[in-house]
Image: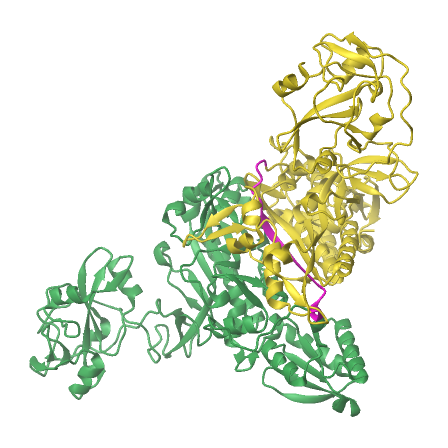
Chain colours: A green, B yellow
Amino acid sequence: MRYSEYLLPTLKETPADAEVASHRLMLRAGMIRKVAAGIYNYLPLGLRSLRKVEQIVREEMNRAGAHELLMPMVVPAELWQESGRWQQYGRELLRLKDRKEADFCLGPTHEEVITDIVRNEVRSYRQLPLNLYQIQTKFRDEIRPRFGLMRGREFIMKDAYSFDLDDAGADGAYERMYQAYRRIFKRCGLNFRAVEADTGNIGGSSSHEFMVLAESGEDAIVSCDSCEYAANVEKAELRVPESQMPAPSEDLTKVLTPARKSVEDVAAFLKTTPQRLVKTLIVQTDKGETLAVLLRGDRELNDIKLCRLLDCAWIEMAGEDVVLKATGAPNGFAGPVGLKLRIFADREVQAMADFITGANDKDAHYTGVNLGRDCEVETFADLRKAVAGDPCPRCAGKLEVWRGIEVGHVFKLGTKYSESLGAVVLDDQGRERLLVMGCYGIGIGRTLASAIEQNHDADGIIWPLPIAPFEVLVVMLNPNDAEVKAAAEKLYGELRERGVEVLLDDRDERPGAKFKDADLLGIPVRLTVGARGLKEGQVEVKLRAGGAVAMLPVASAAGDVARRVDLERSGQ
Amino acid sequence: MRYSEYLLPTLKETPADAEVASHRLMLRAGMIRKVAAGIYNYLPLGLRSLRKVEQIVREEMNRAGAHELLMPMVVPAELWQESGRWQQYGRELLRLKDRKEADFCLGPTHEEVITDIVRNEVRSYRQLPLNLYQIQTKFRDEIRPRFGLMRGREFIMKDAYSFDLDDAGADGAYERMYQAYRRIFKRCGLNFRAVEADTGNIGGSSSHEFMVLAESGEDAIVSCDSCEYAANVEKAELRVPESQMPAPSEDLTKVLTPARKSVEDVAAFLKTTPQRLVKTLIVQTDKGETLAVLLRGDRELNDIKLCRLLDCAWIEMAGEDVVLKATGAPNGFAGPVGLKLRIFADREVQAMADFITGANDKDAHYTGVNLGRDCEVETFADLRKAVAGDPCPRCAGKLEVWRGIEVGHVFKLGTKYSESLGAVVLDDQGRERLLVMGCYGIGIGRTLASAIEQNHDADGIIWPLPIAPFEVLVVMLNPNDAEVKAAAEKLYGELRERGVEVLLDDRDERPGAKFKDADLLGIPVRLTVGARGLKEGQVEVKLRAGGAVAMLPVASAAGDVARRVDLERSGQ
């Protein structure tokens, strides 16, 4: 491709509303343009990389025995009413009416449509197993679309659905998808973790998220430093502490802590550490109950774990007036002693003695608090968020904490949809059996954006070669120098003949501007053809990743570079 | 692909609501399934062929210097309000609101979005010419979706838009697209004509439709039997007849024609031919005028030509009461003599004397009618539809008439959108210039359907090889015969190794059922592996098109077939 003929509008300025690197750089590198909130054009350069991710996904899905089909974006309401999601799904489901006032939605996922296909076309266990996928435009009417392709409204997704006769079959389908996903993200050149994820309302243990590790990630994940264990921090189990509760050695003593509300302030004021404090959170559930949760002073509550313990949909911190009513004191002085609420405590608290809590009295705390002696806990459970250094729940290793971007999700659905839509087959005994399903998603645009989050520097993108829009950039330093022009054109032609994807910067621009754009675009290999080098019969090769520079004989440069690109293509 | 593992549900019965062959056969061959009116799933087999058409289109668009990008399906109303189409476009434009009550539509075409991109990103004539295209899902809320993919609501289209500094540049872009389209449909293996088309309200002469010739086509087209001239019948000009109006030789005579209303009945009753009659059509315009049009008895009115003459948007035949009021007689007896309406006549009538017309009196006609003597015509013009045998307007040849399916359309847009959206660039003198645009569409699904309309027989589809879902079908006659199974598997493996796309029918079905499905699916080459042939060391090869059968040595069959497929791939 010749840059001079291409629509590749780079921006020098950082766009004002772009908060994360991928959004900023995809705008600046002329890959995307906003059409409306969460709705983007993929300009030619952006589409090239998008298609590469799609193609890697397609190859690995096919290799795993899945079959590609294509379902519509506009889906009739009837199917969603059958599954019940027409009512349940919130306003992220964009509902619309056609000219005949019939109800439709823009499909955010396609469980209903695919289950409808399979219930109509598959009658016998002999037609199983079946795994069907599509790569298709989806729409979710996010209330706060942001971060460019990271959280868009219209986006491209690969969604796959597996159908099996029984749980064992479904487990096999799940495992094949898990392995396919590993290959996909590896081939994309990404540093990722497959982590155990919360399964929400559907239950069961089989759900993994594929997380690309990046500082800007919205999710926190933990992984063991010695075994394969990794989990979303919401899901990460913690080992039961082995130590026993020590016997009390102090008396319960009320101390004044004027205006000291935070754990840190109280600890500093009492000349101790947050670890010696127990914080008492006053919490309200979706069912309207107010209750107390005890955590070691330096820990954070894991909402998901508490919800699962209480079997509720959500919890929230109680407001000032509820706290005042429940404890008799303003925020910051709650404690378990004398409290008339159900009290739940993290297991870690079980191993503490002579600790410090609020006294349910303004500007006062207790020291020397001991459970059992001074107050009663209803239930001890694993209620806190994992932190770096926590022991691994599976081995003797320690947990590390990362930030990640969810790019894929594999999920064992069970019979949720086959039940509501009546998708059955006959087994080898002629009995009707509900199909056991799995669903497997990959955000194609988000994978691309996460690759940039993980691979960029102050100057621009640093593409992993397998998903780079072009593999090699040939910079023609001065297009008005006939020799430079001829040599650059020759190199461009030779590389293309060898099947390398090349962008030729043949613009009439200053070298500085060309190098700046080269760094911004992030094409893995840059070949610079200039008058000075040509005098020595050489061109400069520079790798965007790492910045290694070398001179190559102009005669053999195309061959050398093509071989190198070939090696890198497999994503190794 | 192994049939036994594939989702390929063929149907023995002809689906009730499928009126045309392509719809019927795509359903029966398990290529598509209906989700809602005009909305379809592409099952795996259908998607394979769809992707092949897409890929041919993509390669030829790229070769013609166009750049692929991707615009969204959900488009904000603002852009459509700027162009004015938000108000003008009828209910085929599906309008919707997002959760914040903002107006959007599902894009039926993307002139606004692409012009918005270009006005933002292109400032200088140096960035021109530019041709941008996408292959994308569109939605048009057709009032009567029908014929499967032929007239769907959600459909896949290639839409391209060219931007040039001036008319000469735009003409060049148009010509390149015209040639690219010829290559595309040729490579798809289709018999087509590029015909001059009506340019509707936009004016200008540069519009061609690409028509696949098929009996079931909704459009009629004419082409010359000796020169390159071809046109939509709506557009086809007719040469001015050379003969002069002969002098009258008969007197005007009123004759009774009881209950004879149609041209044929009157001609038979008066023992003459329809060519001796002039029919008088009472027509109403969109502006509310009632007028009369004279045509030779055997001719048909071309609405488009009359609209262009009258400068109106549409005309319709007057109803019974309007006719009665205007002529004093019921339908079937209108004539120009004594008629108090503006009278327009086709040029052919100008050359007629002593003809027969209605007498504006129930059950009566005039014979011996002569224009000038008996009545006055306001304007003579080319108002009839062309028919087979008409002289070519360009040469001495004669016109042939075909039925066709419009699969592509190239159109010189001019500055319609650049004006309304303010898309300008600076020319080499630093002056602002409106961009001159063209737009170019191909219906991807419709191209596929039209290929089937053109290539099928009573048993099923007969795919042109370049767009066949698979190139070769290997039929394993008896999967329970170890020798047959081994030989078929070996052939399947060898063909795949040679890069041939093979479907292996490894199902446990009777040979008759397999052959029936083979004919239905229409894969170009069928290789049958059976016990009888194997005894002689042979497999049977049968071509779906033409039905030629031969025996091939099993050892060399893969090589022979792969070579043949290779030759056919270019669509020659």
**Membership of A435 in magenta stretch:** no
Q: Residue at x 74, y 22 (%)?
A: B280
> Closest to the observer: B339 or B97?
B339
Quadrant in the picture for residue B168: bottom right
The quadrant where residue B393 appears: top right
Q: Is residue B1 visible in the rendered structure shown here?
A: no
Residue in front for this viewpoint, B378 or B381: B378
**Residue B55 figure quarter:** bottom right
Per the rendered image, the range of residues in magenta is B125-144
**In-image side of A114 versus B266 (left or right):** left
In the rendered view, does A203 fall on the left or right side of B117? left
Q: Is residue B524 visible?
A: yes
- Residue B569, relative to residue B462: is it above or below? below
Residue A185 lies, with reference to residue A543, above or below; the image says above
How many numbered marks appear?
Answer: 0
Residue B274 x, y percent position in the rendering: 82, 19
Above or below, B294 relative to A221: above
Q: Nearer the viewer, residue A243 or B421?
A: B421
In the rendered image, residue B130 lying in the magenta stretch gets the answer yes
- Observer-nearest of A141 and A158: A141
Coordinates of residue B201 in the picture (x, y in percent): 67, 44
Q: Position of residue A529 (x, y in %)?
A: 73, 84
